[in-house]
Amino acid sequence: MKRRWLSVTVLIFVLLATGCEGPVPFQTDTDPPEVSGSPPTQAPTSPRTTAAQTPAPAATILRPGKYRFNAATGATGTMEIPAPPVPGIEELRTFVNEAPVTYLTAVVDNRQGSVAINMDSISIFTPEGAEYKYQSASDYINKLREAVPAEAPAEIRSRFDELFKAHLGDAPPLAAKDFVLVGPAVPNEMSEIIVHPTSGFHPVPAVPANN
């Protein structure tokens, strides 16, 4: 009996000395193993998408020919770019020995318009960004008249005056008028044609006459 108590006493002493807090819980082979920390997270995958690439529209190339425009004030016009040379103006240009020019014509119908149309100027732009500007024939004739020699016959000066007046003026509301403009050679390829029907105000684009 004394041995038995002695054994129990020794066992208790050993347990206290080792700091054992209790029996280790029993673990079966079917229990999942314990893993320390949180499991690694995986970024959600999204289906691969291919952005649709829409090709930019090709720039429209305009060619010499017949065009039309609608003024913001109600007038309409048809143009020939370029137009045949005007014989009277060519005669005077040759007389003062000026360089050759190119002609544009515009037939303006202002019967539905609200303001006078004077076809102040036309600008032609190329795909490279160059601008070709065309002025009214009356301005050009006035420039030629200034180059007439002082000793020129009176009939020549009179001819300049007549031609200047013939191309001067505008198309008032309820009226129609033909205009001539003068400038450099028309390029073979154009990106845009801008018409200034009323002294540089209210510019509008010209489009091919068959559109």
Image: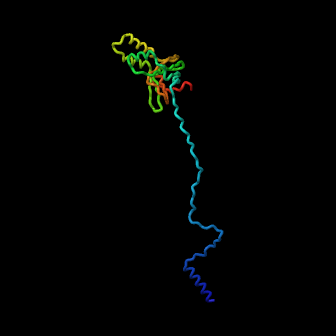
Relative horizontal placement of residue 157, taking residue 208 as reference (left or right): left
Residue 145 is left or right of residue 78, and the answer is: left
User: Which of the 4 image quadrants contains residue 150?
Assistant: top left
Looking at the figure, which quarter contains the N terminus?
bottom right
Question: Which quadrant is the C terminus positioned in?
Answer: top right
- Which residue ends up furthest to the left in the rendered image? 151
Residue 128 appears at what percent x and percent y? 46, 33
Residue depicted at x 40% and y 11%? 158
- Identified at 63% across, 67% down, the residue is 32
Residue 103 vs 126, above or below: the answer is above
Q: Residue furthest bottom?
A: 2
Q: Is residue 29 above or below residue 181?
A: below
Q: Nearer the viewer, residue 27 or 206?
A: 206
Residue at screen point 66% across, 68% down: 30
Residue 201, position as x, y percentages in the image: 46, 25
Q: Position of residue 31 (x, y in %)?
A: 64, 68
Taking depth in this image into account, of 95 and 10 the one nearest to the observer is: 95
Q: Residue 44, percent across and down?
A: 58, 54
